[in-house]
Image (cartoon, rainbow, N blue to C red):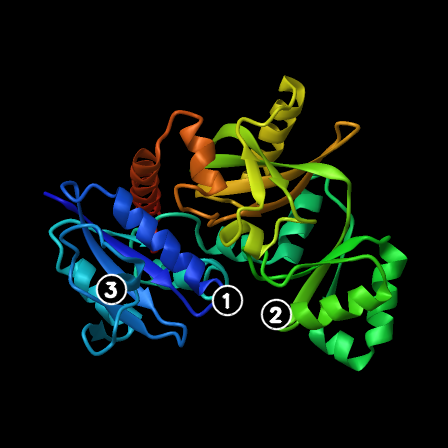
Amino acid sequence: MKKKIFLLYGGKSAEHEVSIRTAFAVTQALNFEKYEVTPIYISEAGQWVKREALENPVKQIGELRLDRQKSTTTSPALFIGDSIEKMDEPGIIFPLLHGPNGEDGTVQGLLEVLNLPYVGNGVLASAAGMDKVIMKNLFRDAGLNQVDYVSVLRHQWESNAAASYEKVEKALDYPCFVKPANLGSSVGISKCKNREELAKAFQDAFQFDRKIIIEQGVEAREIEIGVLGNDQPICSVAGEIVPKTEFYDYRAKYEDDDTALVIPADVSEEIYETIKEMAIAAFKALDCSGLVRADFFVTKEGKVLINEINTMPGFTPVSMFPLLWKHSGLDYPELIDRLIELGFERYEEKQKIRYTLD
């Protein structure tokens, strides 16, 4: 009997298009003799639209932008719950959502309330991994080396912009990076070399979030590693990002051919082991499950600094996370199979928890 897989993608997020690209790539890789695949599209307005199960991989990415007039639109709890309850054996939800309202624990919380199996990180890890300030606070408490940072709320900036800029300049040197606290795919990020650029960066970043983080710039190589597993995670080989632009922004990631990915990264065994140990420590600090891409800086002196972890990293075949595992001996279709297995394993583990005192 085929396993039922519900691909959940789109989303009310600035990363909506990235999510659709990811869903398209996954439909190309799934074994339709092994899985029954049902797309669930979340529009940019937040409407959930489901179509009948696919018989074959979609041929064009536009087929995944589901039309409400030709598909079923209903509340997520009702149609997911009804669909799962009617199964002979549990299906699994595969969230392919990036950014807020999907990667941040909100959808994961819905699935937990419905007691449904799903792929990837849970509520806590997803929420903490989405909020860069909370994430870095947890890294600090876990004793992981990282760059200095400060955070600013929109109301603080609107009340006294000059004081907000002074807060940054007292704690950090130029250049620094300004980022929305709760967004991925390098959306809304700016590099600042002076007060004028800092003010402009605040304006840009506050379009996407009520909270921003400002991080100390550092001259370093950007090294990434994949983590896979639940309670006993393992790591891939390391890879290096070599952007041709000043930094690895959204355009460099998804639109231009301005970035080289070097896999495996040319680092010493000692540095690789440090990166691996720190990645697993970060994975455990946030109580992650399924998958994580951990991003690091390695300075000229060989100091390793953790930058961030991504609980739903770019997931097309040419994205760093799948490529890291490909070079570690796990091809894209096999990686998807393993993530589905890990999702079921974690669901079965949670069913052992008692909720009564009888």
Q: Is residue 234 left or right of residue 71?
A: right
Residue named by callout 3? 80
Mark in the foreground, 2 or 1 = 1
The residue sitting at 47% across, 67% down in the picture is 13
The amino acid sitting under disc 3 is Ile
Disc 1 marks a residue whose amino acid type is Ala
At numbered mark 2, what does the secondary structure look like: helix, strand or loop?
loop
The answer to whether residue 305 is left or right of residue 15 is right
Mark number, residue 14: 1
Quarter holding residue 192? bottom right
Task: Give the position of the N terminus as an image quadrant.
Answer: top left
Residue type, numbered disc 2: Asp
Could one spot residue 128 in this view of the protein? no
Disc 2 crowd, CA 10 A, few/some/many (<14, 14-19, 20+):
some
Which mark identifies residue 209?
2
Q: Badge 1 local density, few (<14 within 10 Å), some, or many (20+)?
A: some
Q: Position of residue 130 (x, y in %)?
A: 55, 57
Residue 114: % across, % down: 30, 62
| Residue at (35% x, 37% y) in the render | 332
Q: Secondary structure at mark 3?
A: helix
Q: Dots 3 and 2: beta carbons under 8 Å? A: no
- Where residue 70 appears, as percent x and y from the top left, is 18, 74
Q: Nearer the viewer, mark 3 or mark 1?
A: 1
